[in-house]
Image: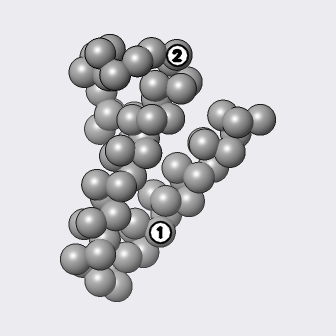
Amino acid sequence: MGMTILKWTLRVLVAVTVVLLVINTVFGIGLIVVDMVFGGVYLMQRNKCDRRQLHRLDLMHRF
């Protein structure tokens, strides 16, 4: 259940980011940073890895 919540939260954040990029570019770019951090946490939880292994995950490819 926890992974489902993380997955849908990440999807909602990405959708809000796209809308903000169209409406207000500055806030949209700021939210991209939040999306990437949240995406990293999601990938760490999904792959059961820790911060030392995070450099092996291709974040941009996942988005």
Quadrant assignment for the N terminus? top right
Q: Quadrant of residue 29?
A: bottom left
**Residue that appears at 42% across and 75% down:** 19
* In this rendering, position of residue 42 left or right of residue 30: right
Residue 45, given in percent of the width and then of the height, sits at 53, 26
The relative height of residue 17 versus residue 62 in the rendered view (above or below) is: below
Badge 2 marks a residue whose secondary structure is loop
* In this rendering, position of residue 4 left or right of residue 23: right
The relative height of residue 18 versus residue 38 in the rendered view (above or below) is: below
Q: Quadrant of residue 37?
A: top left
Asked if marks 1 and 2 touch (Cβ < 8 Å), the reply is no
Q: Kindly identify the amino acid type of the residue bearing the numbered disc 2.
A: Lys
The residues tagged by marks 1 and 2 sit, at their Cα atoms, a distance apart of: 27 Å
Quadrant assignment for the C terminus? top left
Residue 25, given in percent of the width and then of the height, sits at 24, 77
**Residue that appears at 37% across and 76% down:** 20
**As rendered, which of 16 and 22 lies closer to the eye?**
16
Q: Residue 48 carries which label?
A: 2
Q: Which residue lies furthest to the bottom in this view?
A: 23
Residue 50, given in percent of the width and then of the height, sits at 40, 18
Q: Residue 16 carries which label?
A: 1
* In this rendering, position of residue 54 left or right of residue 46: left
